Amino acid sequence: MAATEIDIDKILAAVPSLTRGPGGVVAVVKDGQLLGQCAWGWADLDRRRPMTTKTQFPICSISKQMVCLAMVSLMQDPTPAMKDRGDVAKQFEDELHKLLPNLPSGVTVADLYNMQSGIRDYWAL
């Protein structure tokens, strides 16, 4: 059963009352298409700058856990296309080296989810 635009809008409208904090942004994306989005509260409490869907967040390390969750989930239950291409961990590692060509060879998915990749913290750069 596909969610309708009205269902998504109702769900998004309820999110601010279910969360704590000064503000936030949430979006629903399916197959690369934005189905709905909602921003509420304050991006900067002191300056009373409202949160918008264009607000940029310094997410720092919080995305590591999400990326690792997605990678490990796909390694355990790969898509049919990934299965057809062979070793899923190798696919991730090959893509990583394409994105970061100066990364030392031999970095594995396990190194990444154990936070032992050797990739420098971008704040330090």
Image: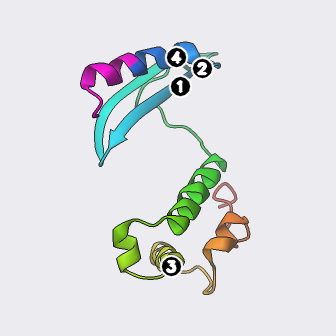
Q: Are marks 2 and 1 in contact (CB under 8 Å)?
A: yes
Magenta stretch prevailing secondary structure: helix
Q: Residue visible at 54% across and 76% down? A: 89
Q: Which residue is mark 1?
A: 24
Q: Nearer the viewer, residue 21 or 33?
A: 33
Q: CA distance from mark 1 to mark 4?
A: 8 Å
Q: Which span of residues is magenta-colored?
A: 1-10
- Across the whole image, how many numbered discs are drawn on residues? 4
Q: Are marks 1 and 4 in contact (CB under 8 Å)?
A: yes
* Residue 31, position as x, y percentages in the image: 29, 48
Q: Identity of the amino acid at label 1?
A: Gly
- Of labels 3 and 4, the one closer to you: 4
Upstream in the sequence, badge 2 or badge 1?
2
Q: Are marks 2 and 4 in contact (CB under 8 Å)?
A: yes
Q: Which residue is mark 2?
A: 19
Badge 2 density bin: few <14, some 14–19, many ≥20, Cα 10 Å: few
Compared to 106, does 64 lie above or below? above
Q: CA distance from mark 1 to mark 3?
A: 34 Å
Task: Please give the label number shown on residue 16.
Answer: 4
Q: Identity of the amino acid at label 3?
A: His
Answer whether residue 119 is visible to the viewer in this image: no
Q: Nearer the viewer, residue 71 or 73?
A: 73
* Residue 118, position as x, y percentages in the image: 70, 73
Upstream in the sequence, badge 1 or badge 4?
4
Compared to 12, does 75 lie above or below? below
* Residue 57, position as x, y percentages in the image: 55, 37
Task: Please give the label number shown on residue 97.
Answer: 3
Disc 4 is placed on an element classified as helix
- Of labels 1 and 4, the one closer to you: 4
Task: Tell me where residue 80 sits by quadrant.
Answer: bottom left
